[in-house]
Amino acid sequence: MSVNRRKLQVLQLAEKLEGESRLGMERRYYQHGVTTIFQHSINVACVSCKIAEKYHLDVDYYALIRGALLHDYFLYDWHVKDRSHRFHGFTHPRRALENADKEFQLTETERNMIYCHMFPLTPIPPSTKEAWIVCIADKICALSETMMPLLCRLKVYKTL
């Protein structure tokens, strides 16, 4: 499938999930730099699809996209000083899974993607191809989203 068609599939599923849940709340909170959690989740879904397609991996694309869109479904601003956010990096996957479980019928593959995406920061490794892909895509996107504003300011991006 072409990159544009896969991105359209990601955006359509994001719109559908947003219409039937609290996913739109992610538009209010920032994840990395100037990237909202919502946009970060879109980015992770798109990069996940690119990884699967580039390496011709046999994956469930619907589950891959859905799990990627919900992997950070913790629904709070982790930048706000609050005791419940103190160990955000370690605890948000469980919180995201709890929230997603309340609002969606998740497959075990989707649950694994959400719960294990912070490996190795959290101790349980992914157990499916889709979960490994989201775990890797999340790190690629986090690095890119964090560094891009700096690279743009330094004008380094033009030389890459």
Image: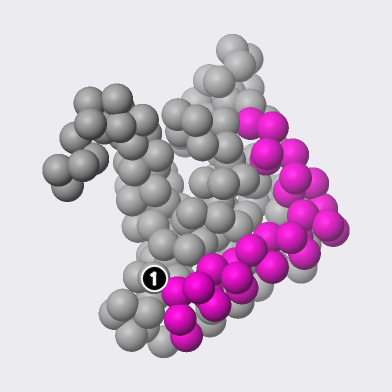
Residue 113 visible in the snapshot: no
The image's colouring method is one colour
Please tell me how crowded label 1 is: few (under 14), some (14-19), or many (20+) other residues with Cα within 10 Å: some
Magenta residues span 1-29
Can you say whether 89 is above or below 3 in the image? above
Q: Quadrant of residue 133?
A: bottom left
Which residue is drawn at the image coordinates 47% and 85% (left, top)? 1
What kind of residue is marked 1?
Lys
Question: Residue 158 location in percent, x, y?
Answer: 21, 42
Number of numbered discs present? 1
Magenta segment, prevailing SS (helix, strand or loop): helix
Relative horizontal placement of residue 153, taking residue 95 as reference (left or right): left
Question: Residue 16 location in percent, x, y?
Answer: 77, 64
Q: Quadrant of residue 82?
A: top right
Relative horizontal placement of residue 13, taking residue 19 as reference (left or right): left
Question: Residue 80 location in percent, x, y?
Answer: 61, 16
15 falls in the magenta region:
yes
Which residue is drawn at the image coordinates 50% and 26% (left, top)? 87
22 falls in the magenta region:
yes
Which residue is drawn at the image coordinates 19% and 35% (left, top)? 156
Which residue is drawn at the image coordinates 58% and 26% (left, top)? 78
Q: Which residue is mark 1?
A: 50
Give the residue furthest to the right: 20
Q: Nearer the viewer, residue 110 or 13?
A: 13
Question: Residue 17 location in percent, x, y?
Answer: 75, 60
